[in-house]
Image: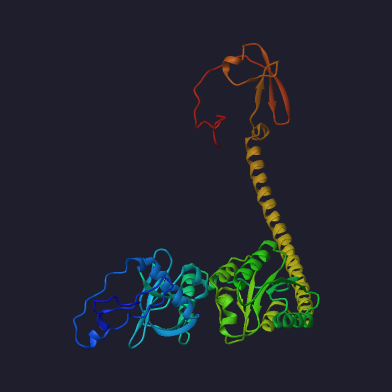
Amino acid sequence: MRQRRGRVAAPVEDVAPEPSLFGEATPPPHRSSARTRGAPGRLRPAPEHLAISVSTLTNLAREIVEGAFVPLWIRGEVTDFKAHRNGHWYFCLRDEASQVRCVVWNSQQDRIPAPPDEGMQVLAFGRLTVYPSRGDMRFVVSRLAAEGDGLWRKALDLAIARLQRDGLLAPERKRSLARYPRRVAIVTSPDGAALRDIIAVVRRRCASVELVVVPAKVQGEGAAEELVAAIARASRWQECDTLIVGRGGGARDDLWAFNDERVARALAACPIPTISAVGHEVDVTLCDLVADLRAATPSAAAEAAVPVLDDMRDAVTATTVALRAALQRSLNNARSRLARTVRDVGRTAQRAIERRRAQVQTLAARLDALSPLSTLARGYSIARDADGHTLSSVDEFPIGDGFTLLVRDGEVTARAEKAIRRPLDPFDPLDPLDPL
């Protein structure tokens, strides 16, 4: 830019480079000799036609920053962590001298085991950008890892606490496995070594057991979703006696799908007795905790699910012998009880007959004592009229009429000549009411 004659150029410290629309600074104006002579300077008028908006500036800054920095890992200490109600995480990463604001969008949180704790040393992977609405520089985090097992252990502890609260880890909810299964379902990768180990063990122990493979990814992106779907498919089918869920050994990241809470809850809700066989003996996952049985390896799971055929035959033989012996003992006991019952019934019936006989004899004696014939045998007689009616009062004997006297061994015809009425004397030996 040329300097107009008669004007003094501004001092170097008072003149700033003029930005262009492309974000490049224009060189400062030509410095005149007046500056060296100490001539006073003044600011140039504002170039309004070259001014840009704040939005343009912040957007240009974002393009420059994002273009200058590729996604990278940074290390720092977590401070000012805040989980916003919109689901995003906001915090700062700082070291001894500097800090940078960070954000984790809720769409990226599935890749992070758990939210970091205050003061935790972490490694964050992401990209640097400028937030245009505020002009702030932010580091957008897509992956987060604590030094050591911090985040993984925290995520696992939080999931265990939730499962414990819902009662899914209670020992009393564990079910027994089928003793003699006919069909076993296996949720695993169809290409993994775990499936080959299970097949080899089952074929060696009992080849008649049917194996049904429900394929699913066991590691990587989407593995948890496929495991949940496979377990749900086996649960709806319900044609198997035991369900094995597992895979072979691997790194912690490879086994993390079996630490997914969704997979653990799907396994806990399965109506079929379950075995979890994930990794090696030292590896313990959420699936191991909620399953009805935890096997150290897939081979151990196959051994727990399927018994040896020879052992089953021996068990059936022993059961048959024991059943026969039990039936024989039961039959002998029944016979003994029947004999005792017959004997007891006979004795009871004999005693009942004797009691009845005694009662009959007593009644017969009483009837005999009350019989008119017995009365006649003791010297009494019964007077009857011509019609056979018993005459028991003097008024019933008309004078001059005949009547019949019934005695012990016959009848006597008599006639009433005279009737005398007198009161009954209870002490009169002729009184028929005399107990003597």
Which residue is nearer to you in this view: 9 or 46? 9
What percent of the width, then of the height, locates residue 245?
Answer: 65, 75
- 74 relative to 4, above or below: below
Q: Quadrant of residue 288?
A: bottom right
Q: In the current view of this chain or complex, which residue is farthest to the front?
A: 5
Q: Quadrant of residue 344?
A: bottom right
Which residue is nearer to you in this view: 237 or 103? 103
Q: Confirm whether residue 114 shows in the render.
A: no
What percent of the width, then of the height, locates residue 429?
Answer: 54, 32
- 34 relative to 43, above or below: below
Which residue is drawn at the image coordinates 59% and 80% (left, top)?
255
What percent of the width, then of the height, locates residue 44?
Answer: 26, 73
Left or right? Give the position of 118 relative to 227. left
Image quarter (top left, top right, bottom left or bottom right) of the C terminus:
top right
Image quarter (top left, top right, bottom left or bottom right) of the N terminus:
bottom left
Which residue is nearer to you in this view: 286 or 405? 286
What percent of the width, then of the height, locates residue 127?
Answer: 47, 77
Left or right? Give the position of 279 relative to 169. right
Q: How many marks?
A: 0
- 86 relative to 44, above or below: above
Which residue is nearer to you in this view: 268 or 84? 84
Q: In the current view of this chain or complex, which residue is farthest to the right?
A: 208
Which residue is drawn at the image coordinates 62% and 66% (left, top)?
270
Colour pattern of the rendering? rainbow
Q: Confirm whether residue 278 shows in the render.
A: yes
